[in-house]
Image (tube, rainbow, N blue to C red):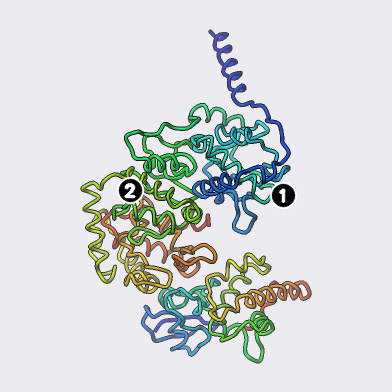
Amino acid sequence: VLFILFVIVLLALAGFFALSVHRPIEQIAVPPASSFSRALVRQGALLAAAGDCASCHTTATGSAYAGGVALQTPFGTIYGTNITPEPQTGIGSWSEAAFRRAMREGISRDGQLLYPAFPYNHFTHLSDQDIDALYAFVMTRDPVVATAPANQLAFPLQFRPLVAGWNLLYLEPGPLPPQDQQSAEWNRGAYLVASAGHCAACHSPHNALGAESTTAFLGGGDAEGWHATALNTASPSPVHWTTDALALYLRTGIAADHAMAAGPMQGVVNNLAQADPADVQAIAVYIQSIMGPPSAEQQARETAARGKAAQDALAAVQPSSAGPAADEATLALGATVYAGSCAGCHDMGRQLSSNTALRLSLAVALHLPDPRNLIHIIRRGIQPPDGERGRWMPPFEGSLTDEELAALVVWLRRQGTDAPPWNDVARTVKETGNAS
Amino acid sequence: MTAINVNGRPQQVDADPATPLLYVLRDDLQLNGAKFGCGLGQCGACTVMVGGNAVLSCLTPLSVVGSRPVKTVEGLGTAGKPGVLQRAFIEEQAAQCGYCIAGMIMRAQALLEHKPSPTDAEIRQHMAINLCRCGTHMRILRAVRRAADGLQSAAATTGTPNGQRGA
């Protein structure tokens, strides 16, 4: 019996080894930009924008697509690589076949397995033609000599062949079949969400191995210390999203009755602004259908939230009676901070030069399962991309002490929602402060 | 009465705890450096330092300040003996109408106290919150650069940690 076990283990190891070893694909001379049609490059540019490639491959101050962006994951820090057509440090020597293999199977040109932080489990669903377009786009960027810093991963994840096991369990390669009973626009949206857009990479819950839940698709997840809201029937927004509101939010980062884009979503909307507006509309159509019609509970929540928003002052609304109330001193401090630091814009809901301040009872951030996003937004504020008009909220990092910030968050949750209080707000304030 | 420490001087002010710090500074303490611009935290003209950080004093109620020390542009130097940043702003002629300058200087001061040798990108990012309607942003950035470089060489020659002067 021991011998049979030994043989099985040996066979398993051999099979695993076979899965993790891939041949390098021959290097090529960098193809001249003139070898790609302008239409194909344009198609690739629009897809790259829809796919938010720049968020991981372009730093705030670095050259376009030259890599170096640090991505914080539960497994350590992974750096976006240089995908400019520079032959030594970029992907200039990659043939179209090598590029396609990376997108479909997560294998580098030299045969190494790539980490799923690069969402090839989504890009694998791209059509051949779209992969060709993305190849044409990246190969016509300015070549830049740049090497990303080395990844800092928890042991034993530095050992790349382990990814073979992950691929075996979770990678479903190749395009997905369209759904005939749905409209062409719906199918376009479904395709973009599943492939280039890789929305579920943040918006679905993940298991301990970092694989997306298939049962709670778009049911809410995590992204770099932020909560990525549920986009399915569990959507936390008190006001039901319309397709138009979603499309506007995705293109501009502004949805007057829901949220202003912040955190990792800010980069997504900055890029979606450059995507084909018809594609963004299709994404909105699809996501809206995933959210489904509002349930009776959601409708009641919307009525309550709109009722609170109709009041002149958030301090005047009927606070939530769910769960235990915080102590009076905390609530009084929160109310004081709100009155002095927030009410000037948020209570009047006035039209500012930078657009409407959200009525906070409608703000999705108050209705989430945990307070992280609200804490991040108060600390960092909301800034539009450099040189663009748009949403603006000043950062309160340094103005408010941790105690004041926590009290404000506790008070906002109680006044702005009918939900139970969040647990451990003070601890979350402390932990997120150390992280930022 | 509320106790407040401004530019190193403990003071008592007779103001409602909900009063914005900006009003306390200007109306009760006659420190008119910090300016009222928008009153909504959108422009930065009211920027002062609280507990070592740059804050928008129009959005900071007196009660929120607590025991943290407040520093205003008056605390950096005088017309006769300007501080490092004030001198750099004069040398670069960084003011046109000057309304934003006290706020600009205090935001820059907070940066240099935390990070004496910032990169140009860091200066730009840090200062982005404060607006100047005359359009002297480039001179303002140059002035902050000059002050940072000056502090560096002062620290190199005298051995003082950041070459600060004034209060």
Chain letter of disc 1 in the image? A
**Residue A113 against residue A357 in the figure, above or below:** above
Tell me the SS state at disc 2: loop
- Quarter residue A304 falls in: bottom left
Residue at the location (33% across, 38% down)?
A182
- Could you tell me how many numbered marks the image carries? 2
Tag 2: Cα neighbours inside 10 Å, few (<14), some, or many (≥20)? many
User: Can you name the residue that lies furthest to the right here?
Assistant: B157
Q: Is residue A13 left or right of residue A334?
A: right
Amino acid beneath label 2: Ser
Residue A235's label in the rendered image is 2
**Earlier along the polypeptide chain: callout 2 or callout 1?**
1
Q: Residue under label 1, please give it.
A: A145
Can you say which quadrant of the picture contains the N terminus of chain B? bottom left
Chain letter of disc 2 in the image? A
- Quarter residue A249 falls in: bottom left
Tell me the SS state at disc 1: loop
Compute the Cα span from label 2 to label 1.
Answer: 43 Å
Residue at the location (69% across, 41% down)?
A31
What is the x, y in percent for residue B44?
50, 76
What is the x, y in percent for residue B20?
41, 79
Q: Is residue A80 left or right of residue B31?
A: right
Asked if the residue under mark 1 is in contact with the one under mark 2, i.e. CB atoms within 8 Å, the reply is: no
- Quarter residue A325 falls in: bottom left
Residue at the location (70% across, 39% down)?
A93
What is the x, y in percent for residue B163?
70, 76
Tag 1: Cα neighbours inside 10 Å, few (<14), some, or many (≥20)? some
**Residue A264 against residue B49 in the figure, above or below:** above
* In front of the other: B116 or A94: A94
For the residues beneath circles 2 and 1, the answer to whether they share a chain is: yes
Q: Is residue A416 visible?
A: yes
* In front of the other: B126 or A295: A295
